[in-house]
């Protein structure tokens, strides 16, 4: 068992900042210490706990499961201390609740939630823009209180709630041969050029696998990152596009459900105990359930 005297509050606080950045240079700058000094703090903390807290893959750093747990504890410890000191001084507790999500959810699902939260108290909300894997890591490590995203697999260590489900839609010019269909199948896209996400993105993989199974030959019109650029290219006539059903239809295009692609569900994710925090409960109450 680790001796509590070997784990200092300073080391925990420094590790929490490192976990926010996963970059020693930026974390050291925020802490106003040297990079070697931060390396020593993190290394000694890991040695005291007897577990590796992060791993390096090439030039990329990621937290281990133990590192996520330590970062979450460090942030909760700092949060409780800040809350206590605020109450002790008779001051308002001003730390914001942190929401992590990706571009699509922010653009098309969470606008009213964010407006309502900010209207009540502008300082009570901070936003992180990240993909769904980064979102899960942020929630597990305590960097974010609540996350929203489309999940490949529902995690069993977090509370997962369904927010909204949408069909996948084909955006097609109003004069196109498929525009009069009530719905389309992937086989109907044989011979078409498509605007698609970059290779290895989940949506791209899903589309390619579906088209292959349907025996539909197709070509890449252009690769684009994010729904706004994908729909922009489709509106310009560069190619057809398959998007989540929450994406607004640009002028000149019509949307047709793709019947042999699965629906897309956005989930809200948080630690099981998170709603005990009134700030988190207030945010959850403002979601469009």
Image: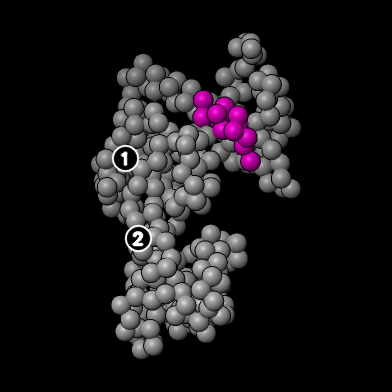
Q: Is residue 67 magenta?
A: yes
Secondary structure at badge 1 equals helix
**Relative depth, front residue between 116 and 133:** 133
Residue 245 drawn above or below residue 119: below
For residue 280, side relative to residue 221 (left or right): left
Q: Which mark is residue 49?
A: none
> Which badge, 1 or 2, comes first in the chain's sequence?
2
Q: On the image, which quarter does residue 32 sit in?
A: top right
For residue 143, side relative to residue 286 (left or right): right
Point 35% across, 47% down: residue: 162
What is the C-alpha distance between the residues marked 1 and 2?
23 Å
Residue 75 in picture, x, y percent from top left: 50, 28
Point 39% across, 60% down: residue: 263
Point 69% across, 38% down: residue: 55
**Relative depth, front residue between 214 and 168:** 214
Quarter placement of the N terminus: top right
Residue 209 in picture, x, y percent from top left: 55, 66
Residue 17 drawn above or below residue 182: above
Residue 272 in picture, x, y percent from top left: 40, 31
Q: Which residue is mark 2?
A: 166
Point 39% across, 28% down: residue: 273
Q: Which mark is residue 283?
A: 1
Q: Is residue 133 magenta?
A: no
For residue 271, side relative to residue 113 (left or right): right
Report if residue 25 is visible in the image: no
- Within-10-Å neighbours for mark 1: few <14, some 14–19, many 20+: many
What range is drawn magenta here? 62-73
For residue 108, side relative to residue 222 (left or right): left
């Amino acid at each position: 068992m680790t001796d509590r005297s070997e784990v200092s509050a300073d080391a925990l606080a420094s590790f929490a900042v490192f976990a926010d950045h996963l970059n020693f240079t930026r974390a050291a700058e925020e802490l106003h210490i040297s990079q070697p000094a931060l390396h020593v703090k993190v290394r000694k903390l890991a040695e005291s706990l007897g577990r590796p807290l992060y791993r390096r893959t090439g030039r990329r750093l990621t937290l281990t499961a133990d590192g996520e747990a330590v970062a979450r504890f460090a942030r909760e410890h700092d949060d409780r201390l800040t809350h206590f000191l605020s109450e002790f001084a008779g001051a308002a507790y001003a730390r914001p609740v942190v929401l992590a999500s990706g571009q699509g959810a922010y653009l098309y699902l969470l606008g009213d939630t964010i407006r309502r939260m900010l209207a009540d108290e502008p300082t009570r909300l901070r936003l992180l823009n990240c993909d769904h894997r980064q979102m899960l890591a942020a929630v597990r490590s305590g960097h974010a209180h609540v996350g929203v995203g489309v999940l490949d697999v529902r995690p069993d260590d977090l509370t997962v709630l369904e927010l909204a489900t949408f069909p996948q839609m084909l955006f097609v010019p109003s004069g196109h041969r498929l525009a009069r269909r009530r719905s389309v199948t992937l086989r109907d896209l044989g011979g078409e050029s498509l605007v698609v996400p970059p290779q290895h993105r989940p949506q791209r993989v899903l589309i390619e696998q579906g088209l292959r199974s349907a025996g539909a030959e197709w070509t890449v019109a252009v690769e684009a990152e994010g729904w706004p650029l994908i729909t922009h290219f489709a509106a310009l006539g560069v190619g057809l596009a398959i998007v989540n059903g929450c994406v607004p239809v640009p002028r000149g295009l019509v949307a047709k459900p793709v019947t042999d692609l699965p629906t897309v569900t956005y989930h809200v994710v948080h630690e099981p105990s998170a709603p005990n925090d009134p700030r988190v409960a207030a945010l959850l109450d403002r979601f469009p359930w």
